[in-house]
Amino acid sequence: MKNKYTKTIIMFLSLTIFLSLFTNFNLTTKASTVTTKEKDISLILDISNNLPSQSKKEFNTACSNFCKNILSKSPNSKISIITADKTKNILSFTSDAKELNERITSALTSEETDINECLQISNDLFTSNSPSNSDKSIVILNNELSNNTFSSQDKYNSCENYTSSISSYIKNLSSKYEIYSLSYLNNSAKNDNSLLQKSLKNIIPKNYYETNNIKSLSSELNAISKKLTSSPPIIIIPGIMGSRLYKDSDCTVQIWDPVVKLNPSDENSIYNLGKNINISSTLFTKKVVNQVPLSTSEREYGAQNSYKNLVDTICNEFPDREVYFFSYDFRKSNVSAGEQLKDFIDNTLNVSKVDLVCHSMGGIVASNYATLDTSKIDKVITLGTPYEGAPTLINSVLNWSILSEDWNKTDFALGVCGLTKKVKSGFSGVAELYPTRNYFDAVGFSSKFKDGLFSSHISQIDYSKYSEYGKTIFQNIYDSCVAEQEGITLNGSNILSTLNNSYFAIGTGEKTISSLVFKNGNTLDSIDVSSLVYENNGDGTVPKLSSTMIGGLDNVNSNNVRYFSETTHGGLVNSSNPIKWTTDILKQGTSTLGNKTITNGKPYIVMRIDSPTTATIDKNGEILNSDTVSTNFSSYGRLDRIGENGNIKMAAIDEDNNCNVTFHGTDKGKMDYDMSWYDENNNLKEERHFDNIPIEKGTKIFTTTDKSNPTELQIDEDGNGEIDKIVKSDKDKQDEQVLLILNDSDSNNSGGNMTEAIATNTSSLDESKSITNSNINILTCIIIITLIASSMAIAITVINKKKKSN
């Protein structure tokens, strides 16, 4: 029993409701040279003219070597030498080392340099002569202020005013350019003349350098040149549930993904998952470190090792760059994660530029970071990001019955894992993926309302009702989550679409939940999902309209957007083509991989089975089985379980696959079975319905997905291997209910009786936004049957009386 449950729980975790399990395979790649983009550098020289000639010579050598280092390591770079002496200052960028050396020699003979004026010159030069997409940096090289710097004729009253003015100007420019400073402290400076250096050190502490040894100028400038020419670090940001979480700051007790231990007294046991992962619990992530020098056994690959292929490939492709896996607490708001990312970039890495590679919700984290600072984003690559939310997350929160094998063991699963509706609905990271107002307006959602004891109807809801459901599910965090969605939007689209250096990979051609039908309720326990709406253009998790910002990517450079057909959500970080596309973008900002336009998926069938049965769909031995997991994927489609106790099974499969379908009764009840055919553009073409099929524990029903003939249900009522009834849809009688009587000659056994089932067939070419569902009133059926039986009894009585009288 223990092994059985252990196997069940492992399967549950690996196919957890919030993550698509990714197919793992090894990708072997060779290291490649990184193509760097243009770097424009303004070198401001503020050197006192009264320096000894030998010191000036050292300055000249240090500056010349600095320029040579920049140009040799970054051939696309250009430099300008700036002083306040306009007669000696040539205001242009150049990559000619000889010309730069001449400018340096000339600049060192200037008598006075006003750093404020040099900063203004640099700003004007960047604005007029530097490409918009180049990296722009300012390097200030100065020696300590001399005692006679400030005369009565100077326009500044004091050193304090002068340094205050410089400080203010540098603060204004720091959002546009990376600013470095190197101070040569040639005097011991025990007076206010050191204020300039102190001020610069205070403003740019991570980029401030100083030395009192003239011989060290070259090495200090070399350190700056290394920062300027090194390729930016690569930060990989995983999606929701993609980070490992720990209970302690030392990260020894792993909570997600947990170690499978079935001992309730063990704090690390899976029994305690619900308690430990509750939003009220403080959890930790491992320190973010460079992955390149680590062995594969030491690297961070995220929960379930989902990012192993991506991390290893990037590390192999860029051995000379730093690669970080940015784990974050996915339970909390993406606003918080964006702030953490900024702190990591600014204070831990202290770099001028970074490349961001983001999967799924990681793109939302990057979006929140972009609202705080875009100046340090060299490139941002997103793969399968749900910019407008993901309807599947609603189903994941509400469908708390998610244990494999026997769904009667649901209570056991929740007792072990504790991922209840209440726990999941407390995660802001999940709530922020509730589909946005833009998505709602484009797609629409519906709800099933009860008309009475035996009937109900389905109709489209307005946004106020949709928001009401959101507040019911996520309660007091809902409003702040909507505010987060609005906060990362500019001009109707996500903020990343406004950046020239944003790149987007989108999976298409997979069956994806695009909308759903709510089961109406006003509490978290009562609200549920009644039905799912699929499309064939998404990646299996994120629908097309969400990943494309509902047309927002139409305004992005077409070379920055690529579609990968028949690539799953997880495949975007595990399949060879999307990963190769990612490394190409990191190298040179372009790639020939992927499609420039979306390729529509295949025509498909949607099946809905509401019954106490398990469902098996078999295509040449490849099986979708509702017993195994809450969501099951195959090469030809998917199968989902929804509703209370998972009684409702839904499948979306390719139409060109004639599959064998089997239903196996698990309890006594009735089965409603619907089949809907859609074309490649998601237009409804035809429907067939079977209502009120009697089910007993052990009943087996066999059918196929063949559209060319009437759908036939072969019913083995008692599971003894013999067909007792056959129910057919009448393909030729559109919109007409057909009552079928099964005679002895139509059955494989001699006990055929009139079936209680009614089969209906409907053909519809129009997709209606208002869905209606008319159930057969069971009470009416009972009354009719009772009347027929009574009439027959009366007739028999009359006949018997006549016989007796004769």
Image: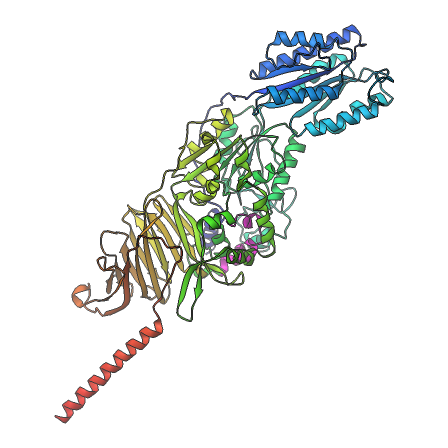
Tell me the residue at 47%/44% (across/down). 546
- Name the residue furthest bottom: 805
Instruction: Locate residue 123: give its quadrant.
Output: top right
Please indicate whether residue 803 sits to the left or right of residue 508 in the image: left
Range of residues picked out in magenta: 411-435
- Residue 536 seen in the current view: yes
Colour convention: rainbow
- Name the residue furthest left: 806
Q: Is residue 428 magenta?
A: yes
Q: Is residue 419 magenta?
A: yes
Q: Position of residue 182 (x, y in %)?
A: 73, 19
Instruction: Locate residue 341: give its quadrant.
Output: top right
- Residue 573 seen in the current view: no
Return the residue nearer the eye: 555 or 257: 555
Please indicate whether residue 319 sits to the left or right of residue 716 in the image: right
Q: Position of residue 296 (x, y in %)?
A: 52, 32
Tell me the residue at 72%/26% (across/down). 170
User: Chief secondary structure of the magenta span?
Assistant: helix
Q: Position of residue 748 (x, y in %)?
A: 19, 63
Please indicate whether residue 574 sits to the left or right of residue 208 in the image: left
Quarter of the N terminus within the rendering: bottom left
Q: Position of residue 154 (x, y in %)?
A: 83, 18
Quarter of the C terminus within the rendering: bottom left
Return the residue nearer the eye: 162 or 296: 162
The image shows residue 322, relative to residue 401, as above or below, that is above
Tell me the residue at 50%/25% (across/down). 587
Tell me the residue at 66%/10% (across/down). 64
The image shows residue 202, relative to residue 390, as above or below, that is above
Return the residue nearer the eye: 208 or 315: 208
The image shows residue 260, relative to residue 324, as above or below, that is below
Please indicate whether residue 694 sits to the left or right of residue 254 in the image: left
Return the residue nearer the eye: 161 or 790: 161
